[in-house]
């Protein structure tokens, strides 16, 4: 498509849109199959023309414009898919006659006449089966689309009358341009897995049953989080924690859900043995700390974790290993993105391998490991002052975002190795363990106890990997104190120093102001990925 063709496509596209403004029900009826296909064809030609016209652009601004346009189109496609799935269910599309479906494959729908429906048994058992066949996807995926539409767009009762969606607050976000509809759908899926099956169509009304501690529906709280958070990563973390806490209440949990242990799993690979490890909340926090330390290449522990047993020729601190014997590809399906490459002369030690090496080092007590300093997991628990006064109902949160219910919290406070960080109502640090004075290691722990991780919203760098930043630089007279310190990962620490990200103090806490292209509101923010302040 040349420039002239693109101009013609744009003109034709504009004329079509003028005739298809659905301002009322009558306007909607004027959209027939031919008009719909014409719009889609013109739109497709416009998009193809834009892509080809810009595929060799040397202007990075146009590349960003194209990227933003692609995201908007993708978001609208998600909304259109949900609306289409809802209409398939509402119109019982699976009852269409076979010949009607055959014609629809090759020519636009003739909406001047009524749709022909099968007089006897239809070709498909339900709308999801038709959807799966029409889009050439699995039935499970098609069924999930239908359920998403039911949860977010609308449902029907046994008489076929419309009923509000099961998750109305999430459904309202679908048209919010600031919220990704994919994130809304993913949140809906997560909540629906913990809810009873929706039986509204069978005559038994079903409403959300999953409530937070204050009695508010989790889907309402989740919708508010999606609307308020600056990054999807922060929202995902908060919503995951919200769902976990609400669904792990003693009244709803099963014994199997709380079972700990190590289970040997069957595998087709004779070269390795697989285990499934289920641990408690405190143990999970210790393992998180262990893994984060093993992933830090700047420490001796991190360098040792990059050496696999039996490969003494590997240089300390290297991410590479000597050539490995050729083994068949039997990686477990959950090893996302991993694959065996026997042709590669060097193999990098993957994060799962580093975690395993750190765990084995923790257990090593004899042989060449004897007397060697091992990784020591560190657990910091974030609490409010009121929690200490009411341990019966207190909740705590670890540095890695693990929520600790009252029972686990009381056990932790009996352990001398646990560092309790106590906060006031505004999240300001009141006390940090039993330290009487702050020396550099204690200062680092105090800063991380207060801020938990990098200050930039959405940053997921583990606390063990962040650096401590002088908010007022040492060269300008800034002192090394809790009131002049804030954590940042490698990349964001540099952004602090360059002034790209500003750090300010408010109410005893450091906040960041992001660049305008990231946050047009220029609102002071804190990273809540690891949990709420205080």
Image: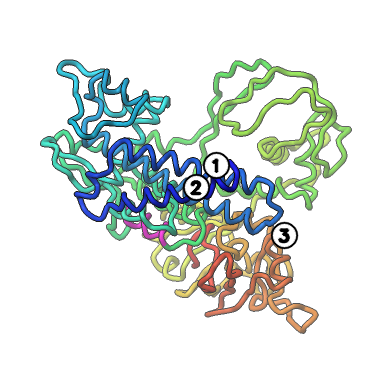
Q: Main secondary structure of the magenta part?
A: helix
Q: Which mark is residue 8?
A: 2
Q: Which mark is residue 48?
A: 1
Please report the residue visible at 58 percent of the width from the left and 41 percent of the height from the top. 1
Tally of marks: 3
Looking at the image, is mark 1 or mark 3 nearer the viewer? 1
258 inside magenta stretch: no
Please report the residue visible at 83 percent of the width from the left and 28 percent of the height from the top. 345
Q: Would you say residue 218 is visible in this rendering?
A: no
Looking at the image, is mark 1 or mark 2 nearer the viewer? 2
22 and 348: which is toward the camera: 22
Label 1 or label 2, whichever comes before in sequence order: 2
Question: Which residue was labeled with disc 3?
Answer: 490
The part of the chain drawn in magenta is 218-227
Q: Residues within 10 Å of mark 3 (few under 14, many from 20)?
A: few
Q: With respect to residue 276, does 191 lie above or below?
A: below
Looking at the image, is mark 2 or mark 3 nearer the viewer? 2
Q: CA distance from mark 1 to mark 2?
A: 13 Å
Across and down, in percent, residue 319 comes to: 79, 40
Q: Which mark is residue 96?
A: none
Label 2 or label 3, whichever comes before in sequence order: 2
């Amino acid at each position: 498509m040349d420039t002239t063709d693109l101009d013609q496509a744009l003109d034709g596209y504009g004329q079509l849109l003028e005739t298809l403004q659905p301002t009322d029900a009558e306007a909607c009826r004027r959209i027939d199959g031919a008009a719909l296909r014409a719009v889609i064809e013109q739109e497709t030609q416009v998009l193809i023309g834009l892509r080809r016209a810009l595929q060799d652009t040397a202007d990075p601004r146009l590349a960003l414009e194209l990227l933003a346009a692609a995201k908007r189109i993708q978001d609208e496609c998600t909304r259109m898919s949900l609306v289409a799935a809802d209409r398939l269910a509402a119109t019982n599309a699976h009852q269409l006659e076979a010949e009607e479906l055959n014609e629809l494959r090759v020519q636009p729908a003739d909406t001047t006449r009524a749709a022909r429906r099968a007089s006897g048994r239809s070709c498909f058992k339900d709308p999801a089966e038709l959807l799966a066949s029409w889009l050439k996807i699995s039935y499970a995926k098609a069924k999930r689309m239908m359920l998403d539409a039911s949860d977010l767009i609308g449902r029907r009762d046994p008489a076929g009358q419309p009923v509000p969606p099961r998750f109305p607050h999430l459904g309202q976000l679908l048209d919010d341009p600031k919220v990704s509809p994919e994130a809304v759908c993913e949140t809906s899926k997560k909540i629906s897995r913990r809810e009873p099956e929706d039986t509204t169509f069978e005559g038994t009304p079903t409403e959300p049953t999953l409530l937070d501690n204050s009695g508010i529906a989790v889907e309402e709280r989740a919708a508010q989080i999606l609307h308020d958070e600056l990054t999807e990563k922060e929202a995902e973390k908060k919503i995951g924690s919200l769902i976990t806490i609400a669904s792990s209440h003693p009244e709803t949990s099963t014994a199997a859900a709380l079972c700990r242990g190590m289970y040997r799993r069957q595998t087709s690979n004779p070269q390795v043995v697989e285990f499934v490890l289920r641990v408690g909340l405190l143990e999970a926090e210790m393992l998180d700390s262990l893994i984060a330390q093993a992933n830090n290449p700047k420490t001796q522990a991190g360098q040792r974790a990059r050496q696999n047993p039996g490969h003494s020729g590997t240089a300390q601190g290297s991410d590479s290993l000597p050539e490995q014997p050729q083994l068949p590809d039997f990686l477990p399906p959950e090893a996302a993105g991993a694959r065996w490459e026997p042709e590669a002369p060097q193999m990098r030690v993957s994060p799962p391998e580093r975690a395993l090496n750190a765990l084995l080092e923790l257990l090593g007590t004899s042989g060449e490991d004897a007397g060697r300093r091992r990784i020591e997991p560190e657990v910091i628990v974030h609490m409010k002052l009121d929690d200490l006064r009411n341990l019966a109902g207190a909740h705590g949160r670890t540095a890695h975002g693990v929520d600790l219910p009252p029972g686990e919290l009381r056990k932790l406070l009996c352990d001398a190795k646990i560092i309790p960080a106590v906060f006031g109502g505004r999240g300001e640090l009141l006390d940090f363990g039993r330290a009487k004075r702050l020396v550099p290691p204690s200062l680092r722990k105090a800063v991380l106890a207060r801020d938990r991780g990098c200050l930039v919203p959405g940053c997921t760098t583990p606390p063990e990997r962040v650096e401590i930043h002088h908010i007022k630089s040492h060269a300008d007279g800034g002192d090394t104190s809790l009131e002049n310190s804030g954590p940042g990962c490698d990349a964001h620490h540099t952004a602090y120093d360059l002034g790209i990200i500003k750090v300010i103090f408010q109410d005893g806490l450091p906040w960041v102001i992001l660049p305008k292209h990231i946050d047009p509101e220029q609102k002071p923010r804190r990273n809540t990925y690891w949990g709420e302040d205080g």
